[in-house]
Amino acid sequence: MIPPLNLRVLAFFDARFQSSGPLAEALGGGDPWTRALDAYPARRHHSPLLQPGKALGRYDLADAASAGRVVAVARATGIGGFVLDCHRVGGQYLTGAECLDAWCDDDFGLAFRWTPEPVAAGGDVAAADAAALMAAVAGFSPLAADGRQVLVVNEPYRLPDPAGAVALLRQAADTAGLGGLYLVATAAEARGGLLAAGFDALLDPGPAQWRSCKPAELLNGYTFLQAEAGHADGGMFDDTIMSYPQFVNSRMVDRPSRGKVFPRVVLDFADWPDHPGGGATLLASTSSVLYRRFLAGALVHVAQHFPEAERLVFIDSWNHWRQRSQIEPTTQFGSTVLDETANGIRQGGYVALTRVGEPTPGRAPGVDYDAIAALCRQIEEELSHDSGL
């Protein structure tokens, strides 16, 4: 058995796939899968949404056995926990965590993502909001970094006073008995003052928030004339279409210079269902192998540059079907992506083991370190080809 490096891969998770419960009732009921998959592309350069495969199907998280199967498949893949969104409904927050918590333990926990909303002047509303947020987060199996519950703050630029908001959140967490928060802000690099404001680390924004490479489609006058004549899709002028290899390289090349920023690994991304009038972001992977190398390289980076208790890599996503970023099995591609995810986690862990060194003094009994080193050299050679990782 290989000694652990405390590397944990987290996947963003949509907990709204449930037929009953507080979250389902707040969303008005109905079939959540229909809401997620009812969009059909109106433009020829938009790829259709994928469909759930037989391995998990259109599960209902309100059914304990179905929720257990989802967590079991994630565990088998090497995922160490889910990141759930906090949905604001009236004066409270709902996460859907109660459907998953029974299947969590020290090896698989729950983190949360919060998108702040504008608040009125004065601290009363903000304090009440922070208290409601902590009430929604507390009481579940925590996914901890440095011994504290992980909370991702999405779009932190919405906060007029980041330092004040951080202090308020930490105070509310202490009042709720959480034992501390590990606050992660979505930002491209650690140069904007968010760490100085009290955040513990940053996280790569999603493709729509951070367009880190040039669009793959450089439209010219001839293309415009074709669109005017109806021979090309004029919607391509409105959308941002990115090359996956360029996107991966822009995320991983010279990454240490960006500071304490967790990697966000993305397979595909297409948010055209949420932009029917144009302005979508499209990122399509042409090879699941490059995605696997992206994931392995991210793990190696975190192992080299983050403290042992704070080594996290985020995958976007486990089941965001409406954005085509899911790694769950699909009807079209089966479990190919899940297999590549498992391979990427294993490979990244092997390489990190030899680069970072053993996490405990001495050598663990029964471990063939020479064989591991030989395998890692082979993996490193593969990682170095074509990906720039």
Image (tube, grey):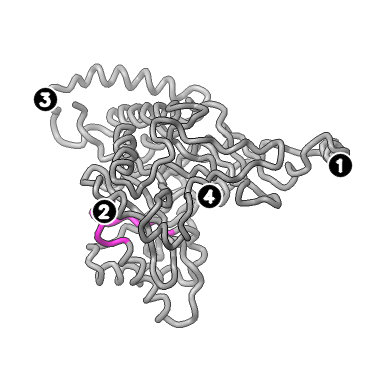
Task: Give the distance between the C-alpha atoms of the residues marked 3 and 1, in whole angstroms.
Answer: 70 Å
Q: Earlier in the sequence, mark 3 or mark 2?
A: 2
Comparing marks 3 and 1, which lies closer to the viewer? 1
235 relative position to 152: left or right: right
Give amino acid for label 4.
Arg
Determine the secondary structure under disc 4: helix
Give amino acid for label 1.
Glu
349 relative position to 250: left or right: left
Q: Earlier in the sequence, mark 3 or mark 1?
A: 1
Determine the secondary structure under disc 1: helix
Comparing marks 3 and 2, which lies closer to the viewer? 2
Q: Would you name the residue on which mark 3 appears?
A: 365
Q: Earlier in the sequence, mark 4 or mark 2?
A: 4
Residue contact between numbered discs 4 and 1, judged by CB atoms under 8 Å: no
Task: Give the distance between the C-alpha atoms of the residues marked 3 and 2, in whole angstroms.
Answer: 31 Å
Give amino acid for label 2.
Pro
Q: Position of residue 158 (x, y in %)?
A: 51, 66
Determine the secondary structure under disc 3: loop
In the image shown, does 25 or 102 lie closer to the viewer?
25
Residue 330 in the magenta stretch? The answer is: no
Residue 150 in the magenta stretch? The answer is: yes
Residue 261 in view (yes/no): no
Give amino acid for label 3.
Pro
Mark number displayed over residue 142 = 2
Q: Which residues are magenta?
A: 137-153
Determine the secondary structure under disc 2: loop
Q: Would you name the residue on which mark 1 appears?
A: 228
Mark number displayed over residue 35 = 4
Q: Position of residue 136 (x, y in %)?
A: 33, 63
Q: Position of residue 376 (x, y in %)?
A: 33, 22
